[in-house]
Amino acid sequence: MTVGDKFVLSGAVLLIIWSYFFFWAGGGALGQQASVLLKGVAMKTLSLKHYQILEIDGLLGKSRIEVRDGAIRFVTSPCKGKQCIHAGEINKSGQIIACLPNGLSLVVEGGMQYDAINF
Protein backbone atom coordinates (compact mmCIF):
# COMPACT_ATOMS: atom_id res chain seq x y z
CA MET A 1 0.00 0.00 0.00
CA THR A 2 1.53 3.29 -1.08
CA VAL A 3 1.34 6.69 0.61
CA GLY A 4 -1.22 7.81 -1.99
CA ASP A 5 -3.41 4.75 -1.25
CA LYS A 6 -3.32 5.53 2.47
CA PHE A 7 -4.25 9.15 1.77
CA VAL A 8 -7.24 8.18 -0.42
CA LEU A 9 -8.38 5.51 2.07
CA SER A 10 -8.20 7.88 5.07
CA GLY A 11 -10.05 10.56 3.08
CA ALA A 12 -12.82 8.10 2.22
CA VAL A 13 -13.17 7.03 5.87
CA LEU A 14 -13.37 10.65 7.02
CA LEU A 15 -15.98 11.39 4.34
CA ILE A 16 -18.12 8.46 5.50
CA ILE A 17 -17.93 9.56 9.13
CA TRP A 18 -18.77 13.17 8.24
CA SER A 19 -21.71 12.00 6.05
CA TYR A 20 -23.16 9.95 8.89
CA PHE A 21 -23.19 12.85 11.33
CA PHE A 22 -24.32 15.41 8.78
CA PHE A 23 -27.17 13.42 7.19
CA TRP A 24 -28.39 10.81 9.70
CA ALA A 25 -27.36 11.53 13.28
CA GLY A 26 -29.82 13.29 15.53
CA GLY A 27 -33.04 11.94 14.06
CA GLY A 28 -35.78 14.22 12.81
CA ALA A 29 -36.59 17.85 13.28
CA LEU A 30 -37.79 19.07 16.65
CA GLY A 31 -41.56 18.99 16.92
CA GLN A 32 -43.74 21.99 17.63
CA GLN A 33 -46.78 20.23 19.11
CA ALA A 34 -48.02 16.85 20.27
CA SER A 35 -51.35 15.09 19.90
CA VAL A 36 -52.87 12.93 22.60
CA LEU A 37 -54.80 10.05 21.03
CA LEU A 38 -57.34 7.75 22.67
CA LYS A 39 -57.83 4.56 20.64
CA GLY A 40 -56.34 6.37 17.62
CA VAL A 41 -58.65 9.40 17.81
CA ALA A 42 -57.11 12.80 18.60
CA MET A 43 -58.39 14.12 21.92
CA LYS A 44 -56.10 17.08 22.47
CA THR A 45 -53.27 18.95 20.78
CA LEU A 46 -50.59 20.44 23.03
CA SER A 47 -47.90 22.99 22.33
CA LEU A 48 -44.44 21.75 23.29
CA LYS A 49 -43.34 25.31 24.04
CA HIS A 50 -45.23 25.69 27.33
CA TYR A 51 -44.85 23.70 30.53
CA GLN A 52 -47.99 21.81 31.49
CA ILE A 53 -49.17 18.68 33.28
CA LEU A 54 -52.47 17.06 32.38
CA GLU A 55 -54.44 14.05 33.45
CA ILE A 56 -56.15 12.18 30.62
CA ASP A 57 -58.78 9.48 31.15
CA GLY A 58 -57.93 6.28 29.30
CA LEU A 59 -59.51 2.83 29.18
CA LEU A 60 -58.02 1.76 32.55
CA GLY A 61 -57.96 5.11 34.32
CA LYS A 62 -56.05 8.38 34.43
CA SER A 63 -52.60 8.89 32.93
CA ARG A 64 -50.55 11.95 33.83
CA ILE A 65 -48.69 13.60 30.93
CA GLU A 66 -46.00 16.26 31.26
CA VAL A 67 -44.83 18.78 28.67
CA ARG A 68 -41.49 20.34 29.61
CA ASP A 69 -38.54 21.88 27.75
CA GLY A 70 -39.98 21.10 24.32
CA ALA A 71 -40.65 17.41 25.07
CA ILE A 72 -43.60 15.30 26.22
CA ARG A 73 -43.75 12.16 28.36
CA PHE A 74 -45.96 9.92 30.49
CA VAL A 75 -45.40 10.57 34.21
CA THR A 76 -47.91 8.06 35.62
CA SER A 77 -50.20 5.47 34.11
CA PRO A 78 -52.50 2.74 35.48
CA CYS A 79 -51.07 0.03 33.19
CA LYS A 80 -49.06 -2.87 34.64
CA GLY A 81 -45.83 -2.83 32.62
CA LYS A 82 -45.26 0.95 32.61
CA GLN A 83 -43.41 0.78 29.26
CA CYS A 84 -44.93 4.14 28.36
CA ILE A 85 -43.24 5.73 31.39
CA HIS A 86 -39.93 3.94 30.78
CA ALA A 87 -39.91 5.19 27.17
CA GLY A 88 -38.94 8.60 28.53
CA GLU A 89 -39.61 11.83 26.70
CA ILE A 90 -39.98 12.49 23.00
CA ASN A 91 -39.42 15.73 21.11
CA LYS A 92 -38.75 14.95 17.44
CA SER A 93 -41.37 15.05 14.72
CA GLY A 94 -42.85 11.59 14.10
CA GLN A 95 -41.92 10.05 17.46
CA ILE A 96 -44.64 8.12 19.32
CA ILE A 97 -45.14 6.75 22.83
CA ALA A 98 -48.10 4.43 23.37
CA CYS A 99 -49.75 3.04 26.48
CA LEU A 100 -51.61 0.22 24.78
CA PRO A 101 -53.50 -1.15 27.83
CA ASN A 102 -54.84 2.34 28.58
CA GLY A 103 -55.49 3.13 24.89
CA LEU A 104 -53.47 6.37 24.97
CA SER A 105 -50.66 7.47 22.70
CA LEU A 106 -48.60 10.63 22.27
CA VAL A 107 -47.46 11.74 18.82
CA VAL A 108 -45.03 14.62 18.20
CA GLU A 109 -45.92 16.70 15.15
CA GLY A 110 -44.64 19.76 13.35
CA GLY A 111 -41.17 20.43 12.05
CA MET A 112 -40.06 18.93 8.77
CA GLN A 113 -39.41 15.19 8.70
CA TYR A 114 -38.41 13.34 5.54
CA ASP A 115 -38.54 9.60 5.09
CA ALA A 116 -36.97 9.77 1.65
CA ILE A 117 -36.08 12.42 -0.86
CA ASN A 118 -36.51 11.77 -4.57
CA PHE A 119 -35.30 13.83 -7.48
Image (spheres, rainbow, N blue to C red):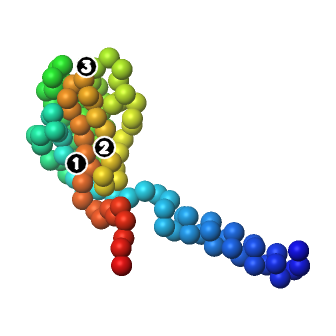
Which amino acid, mark 3?
A: Pro
Q: Residue furthest bottom?
A: 4
User: Nearer the N terminus, badge 1 or badge 3?
Assistant: 1
Q: Position of residue 61 (x, y in %)?
A: 17, 20
Which of the labelled discs sits on residue 96, or is there none?
A: 2
Mark seen at residue 78 = 3
Q: Quadrant of residue 31?
A: bottom left
Q: Tell me which label, 1 or 2, sits earlier in the chain.
A: 1
**Which residue, given by chain and number where applicable, does mark 1 sit on?**
34
Residue at image position (22%, 41%) is 52
Asked if 100 appears above or below 41 in the picture, the reply is above
Residue 1 lies in what quarter of the image? bottom right
Whether the residues at callouts 2 and 3 have beta carbons within 8 Å, the answer is no
Amino acid type assigned to the residue bearing label 1 in the image = Ala
Q: Nearer the viewer, mark 2 or mark 3?
A: 2
Q: Residue furthest front?
A: 119
| Distance from the alpha carbon under mark 1 to that under mark 3 | 21 Å
Q: Nearer the viewer, mark 1 or mark 2?
A: 2
Q: Residue 109 appears at what percent x and percent y?
A: 24, 54
Residue at left offset 31%, top offset 38%: 97
Q: Is residue 90 left or right of residue 16?
A: left
Q: Is residue 14 left or right of residue 1?
A: left
In this rendered view, identify the residue nearer to me: 119 or 83.
Answer: 119
Tell me, yes or no, if residue 35 can be seen here: yes
Please state which of residues 31 and 37 is positioned toward the viewer in this rendering: 37
Between discs 2 and 3, the one toward the N terminus: 3
Identified at 36% across, 20% down, the residue is 81
Per the image, label 2 sits on a secondary structure element best described as: strand
Q: Amino acid at mark 2?
A: Ile
The residue carrying pointer 1 sits among few (fewer than 14), some (14 to 19) or many (20 or more) residues within 10 Å by Cα, namely many
